[in-house]
Image (spheres, rainbow, N blue to C red):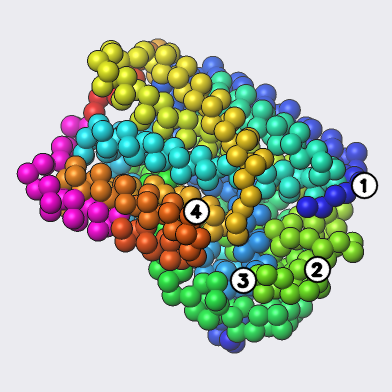
């Protein structure tokens, strides 16, 4: 039981830190990605019905 | 169900929630201007970058429903439940690192998972898979609104008799921007919602552990469950069969689950889809373990009632005995102060809307692209224009919303929400995963084998669970086992009937 207790304590700490770290990076750099996506979508919009019916 | 007559929300909480809803809806509607054709509507023109890809994939699979079922699971199984969370994250990292299935899917430029079945097998099997995916997916989503409504009514203190109204408002808000802007709106709102829900997740974890106390948490699990509260092999709810089934299921979910796969399809390149999957795997570790910890904290603080049917003490809050599912939101209503409660509820609403909008889009895209359009072609009718396809998708969206609303109102869950969701997913995932693995990595997989795998996988999940009332572990094994037997037996029996076998990207359907 002691092994699992220590194992899960460390696991939840690592999981929480990973969650916080990835969230921070995504928050800081995601805006640029969105901006790029908008530009490319507007570009694509000039070529309608590409990739339409399958 | 908690019947509360007093509002837990202060004016500042209402202001935060209203501000979030208005901003989210406005931004979502603005996404409409970027939609030019059906690939914009369904896969955002395949223009997602790494960071937005991570945000939208994580937001899609983290909802209030996720927090509720994981907290309930933590309440009932203690730390041993963490094994399920660890499996979900580790399997996702493995899929990301190896590119198992997802790289090939992205190379094929698919828009839905059943579309692969026409590439590899036949149009008929695509339609059958579409029907099963839609059935399993909609049944799965069917309980979301009810559970999410329960969370919101308990935390905010809105009278439980208004649950239907709360459900309707949630559904309408997410429906508006999903119908109008499709994947583009979903991606934009997902990004904002991901940031907000992550802040809420971290805040709640800190509050829950602070109020319950780490030593008290350990002591409570030890005294209530003994070693089974920590060791997943000893816990009667889990055990080896559960862990193996979960591993299989999570491999299937991370590769063949429509809403997850849609993000893979939306990435700029196969290489980027692998990266997104790997990094989101690390988020998935916390996505499971943190809400499970909230459930364990709720057991520590309020698990003072008699031992219930689940073998754990019933939660008692304010003199009222609750269901284990209600323990976590009831705890939040007690421990969060004004302002923080508003931020957390706005975060949970964000989580709710990101999941539901993606699921609405995911299941309606299956109905339109894999059932209606192929049947239309089989009837000899010509292809639809992009605009018409978008219209069909929007109508399918409305249909799914109505079904979800009624199913949520009238269906009574037989057990833990987490396990119900796993089984309804297994209806199609067992067959789909086996067929996709067979189709990509086994030359002899045939159309007959595909039909047998999909049919037996669905039968193996539906009959044992809904009619014979078998346990979830056995049902899950049964479905995956039958699907594998179906593919092997059908492929050997129908050796003369070759599959389409067009797996190279250049031969993908156009």
Query: Which residue is labeled 4 in the image?
Result: B466
Q: Which of marks 2 and 3 precedes in the sequence?
A: 3
Residue segment shown in magenta: B483-508
Relative horizontal placement of residue B237, taking residue B25 as reference (left or right): left
Query: Which residue is labeled 3 in the image?
Result: B77
Relative horizontal placement of residue B289, taking residue B303 as reference (left or right): left
Subunit ID for the residue under disc 3? B
Q: Check whether the beta carbons of the residues at disc 3 and disc 2 lie within 8 A of each other.
A: no
Where on the picture, by quarter, is residue B205? bottom right
Q: CA distance from mark 4 to mark 2?
A: 32 Å
Query: Which residue is labeled 2 in the image?
Result: B302
Q: Which of marks 2 and 4 precedes in the sequence?
A: 2
Question: Residue B505's x, y, as percent?
Answer: 21, 36
- Which residue occupies the foreground of this view, B242 or B139? B139
Relative horizontal placement of residue B119, taking residue B315 as reference (left or right): left
The residue mark sitting in front, 1 or 4, is 4
Q: Residues within 10 Å of mark 2 (few under 14, many from 20)?
A: many
Q: Which of marks 4 and 3 precedes in the sequence?
A: 3
């Amino acid at each position: 039981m002691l092994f699992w207790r220590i194992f899960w304590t460390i696991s939840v700490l690592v999981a929480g830190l990973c969650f916080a770290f990835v969230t921070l990076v995504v928050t800081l750099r995601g805006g640029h990605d969105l901006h790029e996506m908008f530009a490319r979508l507007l570009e694509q919009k000039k070529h309608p019905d590409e990739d339409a019916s399958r | 169900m908690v019947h509360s007559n007093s509002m837990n929300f202060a004016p500042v909480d209402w202001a935060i929630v209203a501000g979030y809803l208005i901003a989210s809806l406005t931004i979502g509607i603005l996404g409409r201007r970027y939609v030019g054709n059906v690939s914009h509507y369904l896969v955002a023109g395949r223009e997602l970058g790494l960071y937005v890809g991570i945000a939208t994939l994580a937001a899609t699979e983290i909802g209030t429903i996720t927090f509720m079922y994981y907290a309930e699971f933590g309440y009932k199984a203690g730390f041993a439940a963490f094994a399920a969370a660890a499996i979900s994250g580790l399997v996702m990292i493995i899929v990301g690192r190896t590119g198992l299935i997802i790289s090939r899917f992205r190379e094929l430029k698919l828009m839905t998972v059943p579309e692969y079945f026409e590439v590899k097998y036949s149009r008929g099997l695509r339609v059958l898979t579409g029907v099963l995916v839609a059935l399993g997916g909609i049944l799965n989503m069917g309980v979301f609104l009810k559970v999410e409504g329960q969370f919101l009514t308990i935390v905010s203190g809105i009278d439980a008799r208004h649950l239907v109204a709360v459900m309707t408002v949630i559904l309408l808000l997410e429906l508006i921007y999903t119908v109008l802007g499709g994947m583009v709106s979903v991606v934009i709102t997902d990004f904002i919602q991901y940031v907000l829900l992550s802040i809420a997740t971290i805040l709640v974890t800190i509050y829950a552990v602070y109020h319950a106390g780490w030593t008290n948490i350990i002591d409570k699990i030890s005294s209530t469950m003994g070693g089974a509260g920590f060791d997943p092999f000893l816990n009667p709810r889990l055990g080896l069969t559960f862990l193996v089934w979960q591993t299989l299921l999570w491999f299937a979910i991370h590769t063949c689950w429509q809403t997850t796969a849609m993000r893979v399809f939306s990435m700029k390149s196969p290489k980027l889809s692998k990266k997104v999957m790997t990094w989101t795997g690390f988020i998935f570790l916390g996505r499971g373990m943190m809400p499970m910890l909230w459930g364990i904290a709720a057991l520590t603080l309020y698990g003072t009632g008699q031992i219930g049917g689940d073998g754990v003490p019933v939660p008692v809050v304010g003199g009222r005995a609750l269901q284990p599912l209600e323990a976590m939101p009831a705890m939040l209503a007690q421990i969060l102060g004004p302002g923080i409660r508003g931020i957390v509820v706005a975060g949970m609403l964000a989580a709710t809307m990101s999941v539901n909008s993606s699921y609405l889009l995911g299941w309606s895209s299956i109905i339109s692209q894999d059932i209606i359009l192929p049947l239309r072609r089989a009837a000899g009718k010509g292809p639809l224009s992009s605009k018409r396809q978008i219209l069909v998708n929007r109508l399918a969206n409305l249909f799914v919303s109505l079904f979800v609303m009624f199913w949520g109102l009238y269906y009574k869950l037989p057990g833990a929400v987490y396990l119900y969701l796993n089984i309804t997913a297994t209806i199609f995932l067992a067959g789909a995963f086996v067929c996709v693995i067979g189709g990509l990595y086994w030359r002899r997989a045939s159309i007959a084998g595909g039909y047998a795998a999909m049919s037996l996988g669905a039968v193996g999940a539906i009959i044992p669970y809904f009619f014979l009332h078998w346990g979830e572990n056995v049902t899950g094994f049964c479905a995956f086992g039958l699907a594998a037997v179906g593919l092997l037996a059908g492929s050997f029996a129908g050796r003369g009937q070759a599959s389409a076998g067009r797996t190279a990207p250049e031969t993908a359907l156009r």
